[in-house]
Image (tube, rainbow, N blue to C red):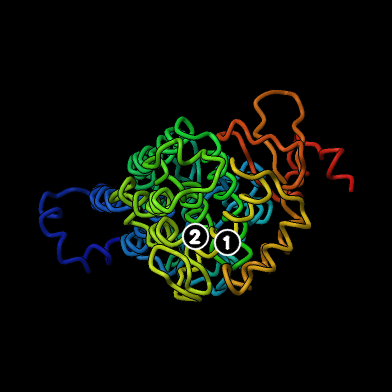
Amino acid sequence: MGGIQETLQKDEHLDSILMEDQPEVLVVPNLFISHTNEVADSSYTVNEFLKKIFPYMLFLMDSSRGSIALKSQNPFTQDKFYIVTHEGIQEEDIGNKLISFENAPYIQEALVTGEAVFVDKVTDSYKDPSIVVPFGWDNVRQGAVCLSSKYGGYSVQEASVLETCMRFMGNPLGRLSDKRKIEQVYNDCVGMHDQYTAIHNSVVGQLSMYLAAECGFSISDQQIIGIYGDMHDVGKLGVEHEILTKKSKLTDDEYAIIKNHVEMGRKLLGSNVLSSKIGEAILLYHHERWDGKGYLEGLAGEKIPKAARIVSVADTFHAMAGGRCYSGKSDRESVINELKRCAGTQFDPEIVEKFIGMLPSIAFTQQRNGEEKILFHSPFCEHVEYTPAKGFLVGRIADILNTPGYSPCPSCMSK
């Protein structure tokens, strides 16, 4: 336990705990539990929590390098994982891509067995003797912590310490998972208030997540953008149903009420949204324009947060391709031409270019609930089923094709 002993000696705040004559195998987990509870209280997402807690893991285990891997939550890429956070890994963009479990046998073994895996061989991925320990929440293994030792490897007792820490970490992770359910509560309320807005939010959130990937965001940030893209219009809960569904032109007063939904969204979500600067930017600035003629603050160009610029393009795309209560659906050519026309005035031209380039690889479908095969469609297909909003899915065609139970729509995918 040389590594942990040195760590304990470094920390000036451990005297009171050590005076209780607790064995080291209990001291470290107790410290870890106390710290994780504090971090969980100030976090909104699992990724945010893991990023905050990881430096403390490295410190307590006196590790030189490591990472936290998390299983993909996307139903079409469940055979892959991503790196939430890392230290000492030279590959700068490692957090931007999904990695197949086939290429990470130690992580896969830890998740399958639920036990620590010792890595004694030095490889490209493991420069020093290492240990891989699984963790999860709600009785499901979701990821693994990978740590490398400065001291020639980890002992069985050190492995036991880390395993104990990971078991206790399931409690705050479970609380975070429950906290995140507030999104679904709000989205359910939106659906009862206006079904179209609920569907629109779901489409925009998922499209925004994929567009964020095209724009180079890490997978963790892609998920944040997807979450808040899905809630970008939650402030419309404060707008009268008659105004939301009005088929004729809005009056100036009605339009002012509509515009207020961006500020209303932040107020509704309260302190939860304030833990994410990306989320707050999406709620407040997704109606800003590249030329500065939008609202809430009249921001222009790159002064508009990039995440908000992404959601703005996805928002307008679906308003045209999916139709509004006051207008029908537009065809592919009309939508693409309008996006190009507004690039440089309403939209960031670079993001428009990336979005148009991404569209041929994207399909719309529904989540499977039985044995019957589900069709997936072009975003412009007249047979797209948007309801129920909870089951609506956006995916990359290549990933959907590799997922059992899905077939291409014969009307749009054969073209």
Which marked residue is nearer to the observer: mark 2 or mark 1?
1
Q: Position of residue 383 (x, y in %)?
A: 76, 36
Q: Position of residue 12 (x, y in %)?
A: 15, 66
Which corner quadrant holds the N terminus? bottom left
Residues at discs 2 and 1 in contact (Cβ within 8 Å): yes
Whole-number angstrom distance, CA of label 2 to CA of label 1:
8 Å
Viewer-nearest residue: 405 or 286: 286
Q: Is residue 13 left or right of residue 353?
A: left
Viewer-nearest residue: 240 or 153: 240
Q: Is residue 268 left or right of residue 130?
A: left
Q: Position of residue 148 (x, y in %)?
A: 46, 64
Viewer-nearest residue: 367 or 29: 367
Q: Is residue 57 left or right of residue 18?
A: right
Badge 2: residue crowd in 10 Å (few <14, some 14–19, many ≥20): many
Q: Secondary structure at mark 2?
A: helix
Q: Farthest right residue?
A: 415
Residue occupying the point 38% across, 67% down = 297
Q: Judge whether 407 appears above or below 87 on screen.
A: above
Q: How many marks?
A: 2
Q: Can you identify the residue that label 1 sits on?
A: 212
Residue type at numbered disc 2: Asp
Whether residue 238 is visible: yes
Residue occupying the point 75% across, 57% down = 334
Q: Can you identify the residue that label 2 sits on?
A: 221
Badge 1: residue crowd in 10 Å (few <14, some 14–19, many ≥20): many
Q: Judge whether 410 appears above or below 212 on screen.
A: above
Q: Earlier in the sequence, mark 2 or mark 1?
A: 1
Whether residue 167 is visible: no
Residue type at numbered disc 1: Ala
Q: Position of residue 10 (x, y in %)?
A: 22, 69
